[in-house]
Amino acid sequence: MTEKSKAPKTAADLIDVMAENIQRLRDGEASPAVANAIVNSSAAMLRIVKLQMEYAKMTGRTPAIPMLLTGD
């Protein structure tokens, strides 16, 4: 991911966004408010994935969750 990065589509992308955000915060290039917004958005995305997994389990289906795919 770069300066004008796209929205994370996989867990690996989300990890990259978080790592870049930590570095930008350390370098003084991002404010704590921006870092907090990114953390909150990431947590919301992960809650959605968790709900999708729980629903798939309850319905006896195999979850098809794009966020968990690595593209490999």
Image: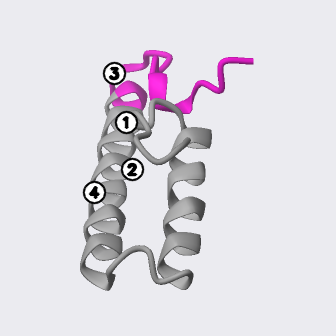
Task: Name the residue tied to disc 2.
Answer: 46
Given contact means CB atoms under 8 Å apart, are the residues at marks 1 and 2 in contact?
Answer: no
Q: Which residue is mark 4?
A: 41
Closer to viewer: mark 4 or mark 1: 1
Indicate the amino acid at tag 2: Leu
Q: Which quadrant holds residue 55?
A: top left
Position in image of residue 56 (x %, y %): 38, 25
Give the mark toward the camera: 2 or 3. 2
Check disc 2 and report its element: helix, strand or loop: helix
Query: What residue type is disc 3 on?
Result: Thr
Residue, x 47% and y 31% (percent of image)?
67
Q: How is the image coloured?
A: one colour
Q: CA distance from mark 1 to mark 3?
A: 29 Å
Label 4 CA crowd tier, 10 Å (few <14, some 14–19, many 20+): few
Q: Which mark is nearer the camera, 1 or 3?
A: 1
Instruction: Pick the residue in front: 44 or 55.
Output: 44
Q: Secondary structure at mark 3?
A: helix
Left or right, 41 with reference to 26 = left
Name the image quarter holding the N terminus. top right
Crowding at label 3, few (<14), some or many (≥20) Cα neighbours within 10 Å?
A: few
How many residues crowd mark 2 within 10 Å: few (<14), some (14–19), many (20+)?
Answer: some
From which residue to which does the magenta span run?
A: 56-72
Amino acid at pointer 1? Ala
Q: Which mark is residue 7?
A: 1
- N-terminal label among 1 and 3: 1
Marks 4 and 1, how far apart in space? Answer: 11 Å
Between circles 4 and 2, the one closer to the viewer is 4
